[in-house]
Image: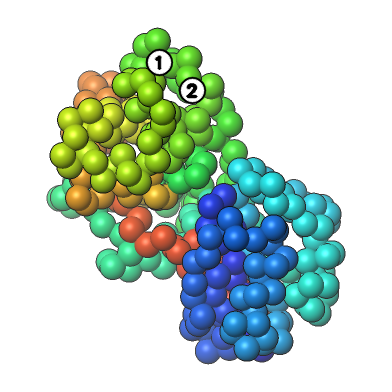
Amino acid sequence: MTILLADMGGTTTRLALLRGDGELQCTVGWSNDKYDGPGPLLLRYLRQCGDPALRGACIAIAGPVGPAASDELRLSNRDWHMQRNDLIALLRLPGQGALRVVNDLTALALALPELTAEQIRPLRPLAPPPQPLGNGQALVANCGTGFNVGLVKHTAAGPVTWEAELGHAALSATIVAELGAQAAHFPSIESLFSGPGLSRLHAARQGGAEIPAPSLVEAAGTDTAAQQTVTLMARLMGLLARDLIAAYLPRDGFYWAGSMARGVLGPPVSTPFPAQFLRATGAGPLREISETLPLWLITEDAAALCGLARLARADQ
């Protein structure tokens, strides 16, 4: 028997099958634009993988998740919604308990201990700290189609996660001050720290039409204006990281994830984020924590599937 794993983001859905031996098979990432909703996408995927009989399904959605008895599943940045009972029937699951739905950042936070050296990279070399960091808390911040965070605390009884919808909160006063008059274009954290936000930031600075974030990142190697926008975004991400560290104290590591974060912080651009981060931290009480905090970039686009697989194995 097989468990379906699906990470439904605003732009892409990543899918895999968890077989009885614990391995992932049929791993793909499909554009959501080609489908009217999650049902047609899931059915096509299962047909492509031989229409296996499912023992269960573990699905992450980019949106708030209500109690297990809540009927509707809805994505925040795409007009996709589905009734829980309809999804159970569509997938021919053996009952209500066979479907687990979580927020996508919960899945990503659960994936952190599962990620290999090929799936993450350090954003700065870090000498061993003088004493253990110790509180078992790690935070992942995802900048993709939207923005959100996932916090995980590892305890003797197992991992504990917290759900959030931080992208809909307002920007801090520090970030607003850094943006100046341009802050009027960004009513929320997500409106700035996302792929569309990077495009909007460049248009606000330079005027003219918005350039898609991938094109903007690609141009940063040769175009001075694009490079300045991407470097500014790294500075703003440093300010945001300072706020998030103060809120969550993730002494076991801060992880960036998502296509926009990979574009700004990864090669070929690789902005000097650590320097921007420490500059943002200043000489305040967080300086010592910030100097020893492990900073990572998740390079694996389908990392949340690792967290879903971990959750599914724990349910067995």
Rendered image coloring scheme: rainbow
**Which residue is at 53% across, 65% downward?**
30
Instruction: Classify mark 2: helix, strand or loop.
Output: loop
- Work out whether residue 250 can be spotted: no
Relative side of 221 to 72, left or right? left
Say the numbered circle drawn on residue 182.
Answer: 1
Furthest-front residue in view? 208
Question: Residue 178, position in %: x, y?
Answer: 33, 16
Q: Nearer the viewer, residue 237 or 216?
A: 216
Relative side of 195 to 217, left or right? right
**Which residue is at 57% across, 50% downward?**
10
Question: Residue 52, position in %: x, y?
Answer: 67, 87
Give the vertical position of 34 relative to 78 (above or below): below
Q: Are marks 1 and 2 in contact (CB under 8 Å)?
A: yes
**Which residue is at 69% across, 58% downward?**
36
Instruction: Classify mark 1: helix, strand or loop.
Output: helix
Give the vertical position of 33 relative to 117 (above or below): above
Question: Residue 278, position in %: x, y?
Answer: 22, 30
Say the numbered circle drawn on residue 57.
Answer: none
Furthest-top residue in view? 181
Q: Quadrant of the C terminus?
A: bottom right
Relative side of 279 to 20, left or right? left
Give the vertical position of 290 relative to 37 (above or below): above
How many labels were placed on the picture?
2
Residue type at mark 1 is: Gln
Where residue 272 sits, quadrant-wise, is top left
Where residue 8 sits, quadrant-wise, is bottom right
**Which residue is at 70% across, 58% downward?**
37
Q: Which residue is mark 2?
A: 186
